[in-house]
Image: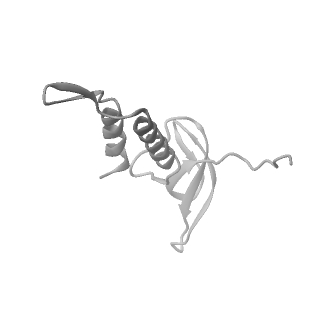
Amino acid sequence: MTIERALELLPQMRDSEWITALGQKTALYTDEAKEAFNMAISALEKQEEDRWIPVTERLPEKEGCYLVTVKNDHERRYSKTAWYSGDGWFARQDIIAWRLTPEPYTEEEV
């Protein structure tokens, strides 16, 4: 099963309210079970957001700076940032995958 398919099914399961057994209507999931569904959905959405996306699969929807994996003439791969617009990537290297840039580090006050 793919993450995409799980993200289709989990909300449907979570939102199934009742089951009828022996002529009686009973709640299918407790509030705690629904909370577990919500946590699983959130974790899968974050995992899907944080993955490397091959450019053969799709390009970014928005203009901006992205973390990219490039392949050089010697077939070595490395990561760097690159700017993307609707016209394409502003980079000279062969970009093979991209992902959102993480939030910058900030020191936590103690």
Q: Position of residue 13 (x, y in %)?
A: 31, 36
Judge whether residue 75 can be spotted in this image: yes
Labels in figure, total: 0
Looking at the image, the residue that sits furthest to the right is: 110
Residue 89: horizontal and vertical position, in percent?
Answer: 55, 46
Q: Residue at x 54, y 35 (%)?
A: 62
Find residue 4 and report its image quarter.
top left
Q: 5 and 38: which one is in front?
A: 38
Residue drawn where x is 13% and y is 30% of the image: 22
Instruction: Give left or right: position of 66 versus 29.
Output: right
Residue 59 seen from this side: no
Q: Is residue 52 above or below residue 65?
A: below
Q: Quadrant of residue 23?
A: top left
Q: Nearer the viewer, residue 42 or 66?
A: 42
Residue 3 image position (x, y, % from top left):
37, 48
Residue farthest toward the left in the current orientation of the protein: 22
Nearer-the-camera pick, 43 or 101: 43
Residue 90 is left or right of residue 38, and the answer is: right
Residue 25 on image: x %, y %: 22, 25
> According to the image, what is the colour scheme of the structure?
one colour
Which quarter of the figure has residue 26? top left
Relative placement, left or right, of 81 versus 14 is: right
Nearer to us in this view, 5 or 37: 37
